[in-house]
Amino acid sequence: MNAQELVARTLADIAARDRDLGAFVAVCDAAQAKHECERALASGGALQGLPVGVKDILDTAALPTCYGTPLFAGHQPRSDAAIVQAIRRAGGVVVGKTSTTEFAFLHPTATRNPRVPGHTPGGSSAGSAAAVAAGLVPLTVGTQTGGSVIRPASYCGVVGFKPGYGALPTPGLKPFSWSLDTVGLFTANVETMALCAQAISGRPWAQGLEDGAAPVFGVAWSYPWESLSASGRTALERAVAALRTAGATVREVTLPAWLGEVFSAHDVVQGWEASRALADEYAFERDRLSPTLRDYLAQARGVTDAEYAAAQDTAAAGRAALGELFDGIDVLLTPSAPDEPPPGYGSTGSSSFNRAWTLLHVPCLGVPGATGATGLPMGVQAITPPGEEALCLRAGWHLQQALA
């Protein structure tokens, strides 16, 4: 099947199956898709016409960009986000925009979880995770400010990759918290993730993926912000046992107390920045915001400049101390989410096992294959030092092989 045929089949599949899933909010028509495919193939990029879905918090000139809110219904940007341009240069074809929560915060989307019907797909990259989980597209783009790549990947049973802060470009992203917002990716497996992430980033992240011995893994059973749930413990125990059976070294580690301070600093940084990033929307359109977002912004406006500066100092100190965290290990394993996907659609779940790592700007990879206490999907998160995206992906490959 050539690229044109693959894109045409993808569009037909979305039209036939996405009505009940709600992963996409806008899709290319046949003429647009043909044009995009021709441009992608002309680039000579490694993706060679691969269909891609992009979270609707990122600007696209050929498709409307509504940021998950009726405030921007029909909004048509004049240029593409930098990540969209990078995908095109890599040979990918953006076939549609995936559903996001309102301004990528907590108000749930209409997207359903294809792996666990009746349970949330997570947020705010719900559409991106669900589209891959349903097999509609092989690659989607999401963003993470708290846990919005790793958590929905866990709930939907797919791979979610949040590279280090700024490793994938953010211009053209509607900001929520500019020192936290990070572009990430979703795929069905780690091999596809490594190849796609390398093609888009232009960095050698896939090199050595399957070569050599597994890195040294560390696992912590106690966290300075909350206790492990039964499902979190079950998932980690499964991962540790599988890795040891496969011959990998797994060492138990004690997390430093300063990680709790970093965890708390995340909320301060996010609140101060969000109240400014969405200042106009709050000032002029607050009655059209969801109560969830409106109440959050009202509270966030109370974060002082001094509190923000102190929180950023805490973040900087944490980044400087990362050598201590990884002393004796290459990769840290944690649950991707605190629990299995919650039932119902009133909540997108908690990002408590992601926030500290997002603030620390480190690479994180969510790998599916474990389950929680009742047998529902639980991902395991591999975390590496800054700049070690290739190591993160290699660790995820070994984890995926062990869990298979």
Image (tube, helix red, strand yellow):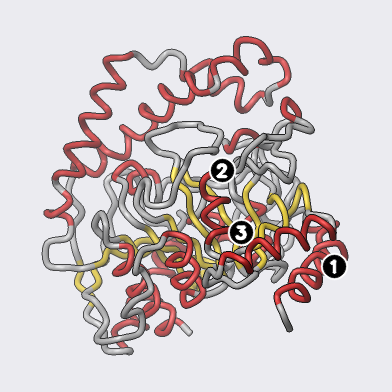
Query: In what element is the residue under mark 2?
Result: loop
**Image location (x, y in percent) of residue 120:** 66, 53
- Classify residue 375 by image quadrant: bottom right
Quote the CA–CA distance across marks 1 and 3: 19 Å
Quote the CA–CA distance across marks 3 and 2: 20 Å
Number of the label disc, if any, that sits on residue 129 = 3
Residue at 67 percent across and 53 percent down: it is: 127
Residue at 14 percent across and 46 percent down: it is: 321
**Image location (x, y in percent) of residue 227:** 35, 51
- Classify residue 56 by image quadrant: top right
Residue at 48 percent across and 49 percent down: it is: 183
Number of the label disc, if any, that sits on residue 12 = 1
Q: Nearer the viewer, mark 1 or mark 3?
A: 1
Residue at 17 percent across and 51 percent down: it is: 322
**Image location (x, y in percent) of residue 70:** 76, 29
Query: In what element is the residue under mark 1?
Result: helix
Q: Nearer the viewer, mark 2 or mark 1?
A: 2
* Local crowd size for mark 1, using a 10 Å CA cut-off: few (<14), some (14–19), many (≥20): some
* Local crowd size for mark 2, using a 10 Å CA cut-off: few (<14), some (14–19), many (≥20): many
* Local crowd size for mark 3, using a 10 Å CA cut-off: few (<14), some (14–19), many (≥20): many
Q: Which residue is mark 2?
A: 81
Quote the CA–CA distance across marks 2 and 1: 26 Å
Tell me: 125 left or right of 401.
right
**Amino acid bearing label 2:** Ala
Q: Is residue 373 something one can see in this rendering?
A: no
First along the sequence among labels 2 and 1: 1
**Amino acid bearing label 1:** Ala
